[in-house]
Every structure is written in C-alpha cells, then in structure tokens.
Image (cartoon, rainbow, N blue to C red):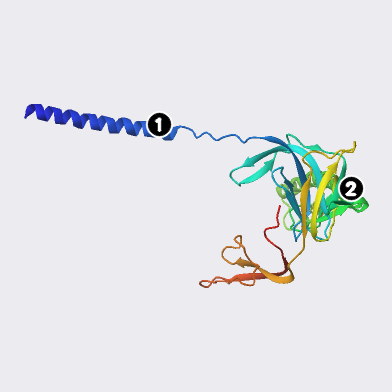
Amino acid sequence: MRLKSIISGSISFLLTLSFILGSVAAQEEKSQPSISLAPVFQEQLVYSWNVFDGKGWRGGFTPQSENTIYLIAGKDNAISVRKTLVYFWPITARYMAAWRTLNEEMEGILEILKDEKILKRLKKQDTVLCYPEGYWGEKTLLYKGEEARKWHRMYKDAEDKYYKALNRYYEQRTEYQKKLNEFFEEVKKRREAGEKGPLNIEIPKEPQPPEPPDFYVTEPQKYYILNLPPGNYRIRLKADDGTIVEGSEKNLLVFTARRREGTGYEIIPGNRWTKREECNDPTNVIYAAGKNVLYFRPYYQDEYNELYHN
C-alpha cells in the first residue's frame, strides 16, 4: 500500500509539473512578438490617373496585373504612364504604389486604337484638380490646358493675397497687444489714484484674421486627356524612338450610365449623425425603429454597372 501511494503521488507530482511547465511555455509563446511580413515590392510600369467617377474626379493607378482601364464616356479623364514600386497590402486587399520611393514619368505619345486602327495620338497637357468648396470639400473639377493654368494663377494670386493679409494681421495683433497692455496699465493707475465711475478710455479694437481662399487648386501636372464615346479601345505608349513601350498596352472600356437622373437619399440618424446611410436603389427598403429622428437629403444620381471600376 505504501509503495502504491508513493507511485500515485509521484505520478500526480509529474502531471502537475507537466501542466505548470506547459502553461509557462504557452505563456512564453503568447508573449513572443508577432512578426509581420514586409510587403514585396515590384518595379512596374503603371497607369496613374485622375478619372471621373460619376460625382467628381479621383486619383489612383492601374497595376501591371490589370489588363483593363474603365472610363466614363463624355468626360475628361487624365492619365499618365509611370514607373513605380507596387506591393500588395493584405489589410485592404489592394495593390498600393510607393510613389515616394519611385515615381518616374514616362515620355512619349499615347495612342488610342479601335478595331486595330489608330484613332488618336495624344500629347500631354497641363492638368489641375480644383476643389471649389475647399480642399476638404466633396466637389472636384478637372481643368486642362490654358484653363488649368488660369485657375492655378487665380489660386496662387488668392493665396499670395491671403498671406500678405496674414502678415498684416500679425503686425496688427502685436500692436493690439501693446495697446491692450497700456490700456490695463492706465486703468490700474487711475483706479489706484482713487478715480471712480466709468473711465473715459478708448478700448483697443482686436483685429480680425483674414479669410483664407475658399477654393483650392493643385499644382499643374502633365497628363494625357481622354474623352471618348462608349466603346472598347486599346491604348499604348509610343516612345520618342517610335517603339511601343513594353507593358504599356491596355484594354480601355468606356461606358455610360444605364439610367440617369434617378433620386437617391442620404439618411442621417438624429442620434448617430456621423453614421450616415445611403439609399440609392429603387428596391431598397428604409427601416426605422423607435422614436429616432431621421434626416433625408435627396440628390440626383446616375446608375452605372458596378463591375466597371478601376
């Protein structure tokens, strides 16, 4: 019985020790820092663009792995050919470009082909994006050529005027602070001298800061401007020596809206005004629960094929 008890106790001790060591090992394993894999960069020839998306112009690029670029018909779309480093970002499941590391602009003539025939040969033009409601506004406009340069000059003039007014404001602010200190000193002196009642002293007027420009225009950049009717095309870049730049041939699908001037709603809950909802399909049903107030903002909309996107 004693031997059996000793063996039983030894087994129990070993099991306990094994459990403790296993727990410690598990804790050490959990405490090890996770090692994230660095993205793999590949140098690629890509199409960088600012294209019309039905509401305004937005930027992006088409990597080497994509064969087709989608454009909305009847609108100016800005495209350029560049070399950059491309990598896949698993968090967003999208390809990204390391523009700050490599951003080499390719020179040449952009050829547009339809049915194997050259339809257009395009040269680059000065292009700007204009934000008429300010940089953080939702609306964007694209200008090209002389109009782009005109809008850029207008913005620079407005910016220069603002900074000059801002310098004057800082000078006035310094002078105002000086007069304000003198005002308080005078009040203190006269009160200490026993003067009572209202004091006939002019209060310095605080200067007001100038208003910054209410619009924003980007620096001019060189882009090929594509404005085409609906259809299937091909594009390619012809270098100055007459050869076709390798990797520059892409399909181009230009499409238009399936339905126009429909009505959509932006729905803003009163208790969660930052959580806005969109109702942009005739088959959508709007559900409202409780006594919450809903604010509806109607807008016109066009319907496009959702599969046609870059």
Q: Which mark is residue 125?
A: 2
Between the residue at mark 2 and the residue at mark 1, the CA separation in whole angstroms equals: 61 Å
The tally of labels here is: 2
Q: Is residue 130 visible?
A: yes
- Count residues near mark 1 (Cα–Cα under 10 Å), then give few for <14, some for 14-19, many for 20+: few
Q: Name the residue located 13 percent from the left edge and 27 percent from the top edge.
A: 6
Residue 28's disc number: 1
Q: Is residue 273 left or right of residue 134?
A: left
Q: Nearer the viewer, residue 287 or 50?
A: 50
On-image quarter of the N terminus: top left
Specify the amino acid type for callout 1.
Glu
Residue ranking furthest to the right: 146
Regarding residue 217, the answer to whether it shows in the image is: no
Left or right placement of residue 174 versus residue 92 in this view: right
Q: Residue at 11% of width from left, 30% of height from top?
A: 5
SS at circle 1: helix
**Label 2 crowd bin: few (<14), some (14–19), many (20+), radius 10 Å:** some
Spot occupied by residue 127 in the image (x, y as percentages of width and height): 86, 49
Q: Is residue 219 left or right of residue 18?
A: right
Q: Is residue 260 above or below residue 54?
A: below
- In x, y percent, where is residue 101? 73, 34
Q: Nearer the viewer, residue 6 or 61?
A: 61
* Residue toward you, 91 or 43: 43
What amino acid does circle 2 point to? Gln
Badge 2 element: strand
User: Residue 50, image x and y in percent?
Assistant: 78, 51
